[in-house]
Amino acid sequence: MMPALTLLAIDEGRQRLHLVDTGDARAGWQRDLADFPLARDLQRIGRDRALVGFERGFIELDIATGAVLRACDRWTGVTAARRLPDGRTLVTGMNLDGGVDGIHVLTLDADLCQVASVRRDGDYVRLMRPAGEGYLLCTNDHILETDSQLRPLRKLAAPGFEHAWKAERLPCGGTLVSAGYGAFMARFDAGGALVHTFGRAGQVPDDVAPHFYATFQVLDDGRVIVANWQGHGPDNGHKGRQLLSFGADGTLLDTWSDPARISSLQGILVL
């Protein structure tokens, strides 16, 4: 039994956002995402506020109630949104600036006015994360680390990456990646060498049914919490375990699912 966690959870299969207490199925709330389609990204931006990136931009919502407090809805093709400590917001996606094809990272000021734009060639990107002075871009079968102008610095890849979903720079300088349809996690050292993978089929019990490892979060105690997405549509909740907890060494510790409420867990933010 997984120790109780409180988290925001995007159910992609039913297009809903939930506040979940894994120890109490009666707690929390849910809201429909019809007005904010293809929500993928989640970030806590204050004690009581979260940023939710969706296909046309992002919203800021009240964590306790799910009420939308602010909305930025102006593009098509957004895949990630990230608030920086200085109040600026980075918006990443495909073909965002002036109809020019490619991968864009836009910078908005605190008033949500666009103040910068950088572009590179590409036809796929998912969750972007800042890394030093540049970015980590998930570009399908590899992670592209770039400078601030999206010029390539190095690639991080492991056999089996397919629609790799998220890469995060760790305090040690290494990088942790969710492999998408590869259905495993990959850890790279500070030099970019693959250290190990974990969570694959055969490394976890059969009922976990690894399908697509999407958003993950590293907790302060070193645990890695991973969303195991099971497919598009409303009836996937019984296909596998939805939320997985791994130790820092990659050992599966616990799992959790709520198939009555959630079909395909994709985005998570442990609170």
Image (cartoon, rainbow, N blue to C red):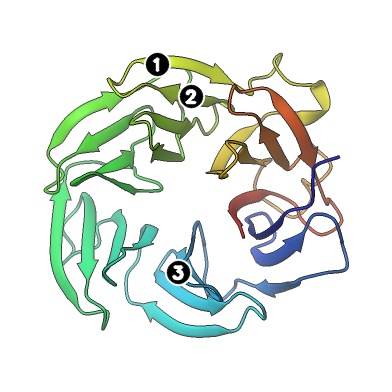
Q: Which quarter of the rendered picture does the C terminus lie within?
A: bottom right
Q: In this view, does 82 lie to the left or right of 259?
A: left
Q: Mark 1 points at which residue?
A: 194
Q: Which of 175 and 101 is in front in this view?
A: 175
Residue located at (39% from left, 69% from top): 56
Q: Nearer the viewer, residue 88 or 67?
A: 88
The amino acid type of the residue labelled 3 equals: Ile
Asked whether the beta carbons under mark 1 and mark 2 sit within 8 Å of each other, the answer is yes
- Image x and y of residue 137, in percent: 31, 41
| Above/below status of 216 relative to 247 | below
| Above/below status of 141 relative to 103 | above
Residue located at (74% from left, 62% from top): 20
| Above/below status of 160 relative to 230 | above
Structural crowding at the residue carrying mark 3, measured as other residues with C-alpha within 10 Å and reported as few (<14), some (14–19) or many (≥20): some
Of helix, strand and loop, which one carries label 2? strand
Asked whether the beta carbons under mark 3 and mark 1 sit within 8 Å of each other, the answer is no
Of helix, strand and loop, which one carries label 3? loop
Structural crowding at the residue carrying mark 2, measured as other residues with C-alpha within 10 Å and reported as few (<14), some (14–19) or many (≥20): many
The amino acid type of the residue labelled 1 equals: Leu
Mark with earlier residue (2, 3): 3
Residue located at (66% from left, 43% from top): 231
- Image x and y of residue 16, in percent: 66, 66
Q: Quadrant of residue 187?
A: top left
Distance from label 3 to label 1 (Cα)? 32 Å
Q: Name the residue under label 3.
A: 45
Distance from label 2 to label 3 (Cα)? 27 Å
The amino acid type of the residue labelled 2 equals: Ala
Q: Mark 2 points at which residue?
A: 186
Of helix, strand and loop, which one carries label 1? strand
Q: For the view shown, which residue lies furthest in the front direction? A: 221
